[in-house]
Amino acid sequence: MDVRAVSEKKPAIPSITKHLYTVNVDVTSPECTVNLSGTAGDNGWYKSNNVEITLSTKDNHSGVAAYDLTTSSTASYNGKNSDVQSDIADVTWYGYIKDNVGNVNKCNNTVKVDTV
């Protein structure tokens, strides 16, 4: 969103001049993705409990201020975790992200391991 303010010089008031200001306002939420990497099986399942979980973050406007990767479904922006190793199957990992003006977003992915 652009906000414009205009002032212009009036003939009766010589000290006022015309200025155009453009202010960019970030109203777009940042983006995140919880990525899983390991020995792939069928249909999104993994063949072992050794799965790497990473959080990808992106904000094209004001930039990323805080993020966290956790198994908690309660939002947290205090950590800076972006890479963990999981040895537990059937766990949902949540990514939380906040940009420099306070816009937030979340993402998640579940580790599914077929031990048969």
Image (tube, grey):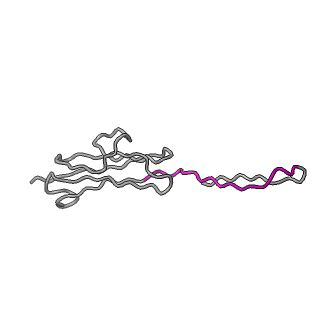
Residue 13 x %, y %: 87, 49
| Residue placed most toward the observer, 59 or 45 | 59
Residue 24 against residue 102 in the figure, above or below: below
Label count reads: 0
Residue furthest to the left in view is: 116
Query: Residue at the spot x=74%, y=53% of the render?
Result: 6
Can residue 63 be found in the magenta stretch?
no
Looking at this view, name the residue that lies furthest to the front. 15
Tell me which segment is drawn in magenta.
13-30
Name, please, the residue furthest toward the top. Answer: 74
Q: Measured from the top left, where is residue 75 in percent x and y?
A: 37, 40
In the picture, which quadrant includes the N terminus? bottom right
Location of the C terminus (image quadrant): bottom left
Vertical position of residue 18 compared to residue 74: above or below: below
Residue ID at (36%, 49%): 107
* Residue at 11% in and 52% down: 115
Which is more toward the observer, 86 or 14? Answer: 14
Q: Position of residue 50 (x, y in %)?
A: 16, 53
Q: Main secondary structure of the magenta part?
A: loop
* Relative image position of residue 101 (x, y in whole percent): 51, 46
Q: Residue at point 62% right, 52% down?
A: 23
Judged left or right of residue 88, residue 22 is: right
Residue 15 is one of the magenta-drawn residues: yes
